[in-house]
Amino acid sequence: MRRAIAAALASVTILALGGRNLSAGDDTSGDKLPEPALQFAKEATRHLTEAEREWTKMAERLAKCQADFTVAERIDSDGLLRDEAGRILASAKKLLADRKQMSTDLDRFQVALKKAAENHREVAALYKSHAEKARSGEVKEDYQQLAKSYERKATAAAERGQKIGMPSGTETKAEVIDEGNLFLERLLEALTVGPMNQAERGAIAARLRKLGERCKALAEELRRAVETVLQGSESPEIRRTADAASKSVGSLDGASWSAPVTVAGVKCVTVIRFDKVGTCTQSTYALGPNGKRQLVGSGSGSFRLDAGGTLSFYQAGMQVETGTATFLGKDQWSYRILENILESKLAGTQLGFTREP
């Protein structure tokens, strides 16, 4: 196939020159026809970068979706139970679809890496042949250096292909979640028959939370596998994105942080808990003489902290707030809200957070 492509390119070049007659003594070394080996290597690199961009999108999707598996703390009506079950079911189906797609894409990416390694070796061989023909010792060394560079690329691509793969056990975990989805579908049907009492709703809610935790664990396992896929990328753009993503969860240390706030003129304290899997919960309490009093509000979502200190919060996969975080030490950081799509007047609000004991 490569010879056919090279021949086709050559024929086009000849036509462009007006069909000049070539004799046996003509010197064709002046042709500017690109070396096929270089063309194939360039194309392989382009395909890898395009695939890596899709992997970064999947990593973001897997990080954000974890908030969709958090079940409401209190379910006191059949309607709320139905809503929560339907939401978990839809999110779990999306997660299983991502897992299935990921398995197929990993196989394709491994093939692409193998081809890239072969193409880079051919480029290395090309420069070695140029080195053998070079008369100048200095130029010969230059060609040899280029050959070594492409040999390194070939080795890196081959080793990278060996490191990636679906985490062991994910198929079994997906089967359990799929069975849980079938239960939810039947639960939704059962809720149309008649009401449940609070004890029954509580038992079902516990099952919902268990399924949600299974989904969170699988999403995190898949996200880490995608991070492994992105390691070793030759693209500076992809490396920057992957580095920012890997730092987005760990910087807040999986800890709880509190900040004083005022809600409708009442002094309160809001407490945010950041989990290492990229999800967070927020609870706001009224303050009394001895500290926290009654709970006045709570919520959950996912978060993302980039390398520049931009902190974003998401609910149901939608970005709802963005701000800047400035770390003042191990136990303190300040946060300035830049935009909140639910409460625009919150823009510019400055909060000071302290690590909870």
Image (cartoon, helix red, strand yellow):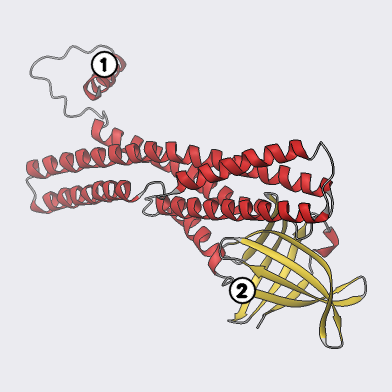
Please provide percent x and percent y for residue 171: 46, 43
Front one among 67 and 250: 67
- Which residue type carries mark 2? Ala
Tell me which corner region of the image, top left, top right, bottom left or bottom right, holds residue 294.
bottom right
Circles 2 and 1: CB atoms closer than 8 Å = no
Could you tell me which secondary element the residue under label 2 belongs to?
loop
As drawn, 270 above or below 37: below
Disc sitting over residue 11 in the figure: 1
Q: Is residue 304 left or right of residue 145?
A: right
Front tag of 2 and 1: 2
Percent coordinates x, y for residue 229 in the rendering = 41, 50
Residue receiving disc 2: 255
Compare residues 137 and 74 and report the one nearer the observer.
Answer: 74
Looking at the image, can residue 35 be seen?
A: no
Instruction: Name the quadrant of the C terminus.
Output: bottom right
Quarter-wise, where is residue 285 in the image? Answer: bottom right
Q: On the picture, is 76 further left or further right than 96?
A: right
Residue 108: assigned label? none
- In primary-sequence order, the first of circles 2 and 1 is 1
Mark 1: give few (<14), some (14-19) or many (20+) Cα within 10 Å. few
**What is the x, y in percent for residue 15?**
29, 14
Helix, strand or loop at label 1? It is helix
Give the mark count: 2
Rendered image quadrant of residue 93: top right
Q: Say if residue 293 shows up in the picture.
A: yes
Which residue is most to the right?
265
Q: Residue at x 16, y 29 (%)?
A: 29
Q: In the rendered view, would you say 356 is above or below 316?
A: below
Left or right of 33 on screen, residue 315: right
Q: Amino acid at mark 1?
A: Ser
In percent of the image, x 32 and y 46: which residue is there?
A: 161
